[in-house]
Amino acid sequence: MQNEPLTPPEPALDRTAMLAALRARMARLEGAARAGLAPAIPVCDALNLPGGGLARGALHEVQAASPGAGAGFCAVLLGRSGGSVLWIATGDEAASPWPPGLARHGLLPANLVLVRAARAEDALWAMEESLRCPAVSGALLALGEESRLELTTTRRLQLAAETGGGLGLLLRPEAARMEPSAATTRWRVTGLQGAESFADPSWRLELLRAKAGPPAGPWAVTWRAAAGRLDLEAEAPAPGQAVG
């Protein structure tokens, strides 16, 4: 009588799945290498931020106390990414950006692709695919108060950003529930002047969380549209108070 094997035979390797996993890993490594060689996205020269700014090939969260302040700050960051960017929002009209306003903050219409998704699931899919593309220098996903993000979802977006090497931004209202996140940094931006003011807008910035260092701020900064730079003010006033 032939002896039975003590252990079951190993299943045959799925070569297609293995090759796909290897290609995905190589793409992430190449994207991380590109992001490491490219300089970080500058925020304000006077701020001593970890790494000198926002890291490329990474996901960052922006918590906005007012829609105009959040959109303006994100437009500055995306405009400095140096290439084509996607602005992704759901079907809510309030979440749709105003291209002339974004241009005033350094994000030129020629570099901007607007995507409006009917469902939050579609918006997340578009964000992940955009971040995976090396031809995209930055992608933003605007979410409403009711939207929730699982930790695994933010991990997927972080891995996608590492693959493509671009800048990933999650723009969320301050009232939204903030779950644990794999994002590299989390910011809060508050407007210090009325949204309809013709003066250069001023914001109160806070770095709430960063993987590379402790929280920092708040700072009061003013966007000088004519010069294309953020200037640090002497002190950070309370939200809603205008900077002179």
Image (cartoon, helix red, strand yellow):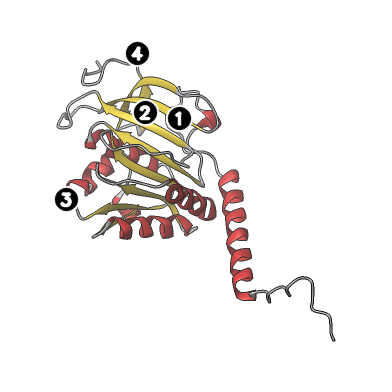
Residue designated by label 2: 230
Question: Which of pointers 4 and 1 indicates the residue nearer the eye?
Answer: 1
Q: Single out the residue that lies furthest toward the top.
A: 234
Task: Identify the amino acid type marked 3.
Answer: Glu
In the picture provided, is 173 more to the left or to the right than 48? left
Task: Identify the amino acid type marked 1.
Answer: Arg
In the picture provided, is 226 more to the left or to the right than 159? left
Residue at 41 percent across and 34 percent down: it is 186
Q: Position of residue 156 (x, y in %)?
A: 47, 53
Q: CA distance from mark 4 to mark 2?
A: 14 Å
Q: Work out whether mark 2 precedes mark 3 in sequence or the reverse, and give the earlier one.
A: 3
Give 120 or 135, whichever is nearer the viewer.
Answer: 120
In the picture provided, is 8 more to the left or to the right than 75? right
Element under label 1? Answer: strand
Q: Tell me if residue 229 comes above or below residue 127 in the rendering.
A: above
Question: Which of pointers 2 and 3 indicates the residue nearer the eye?
Answer: 3
Task: Identify the amino acid type marked 2.
Answer: Leu
Task: Identify the amino acid type marked 4.
Answer: Glu
Q: Work out whether mark 4 precedes mark 1 in sequence or the reverse, and give the earlier one.
A: 1
Residue designated by label 4: 235
Q: On the rendered image, what quadrant is the C terminus found in?
A: top left
Residue designated by label 3: 93
Element under label 2? Answer: strand
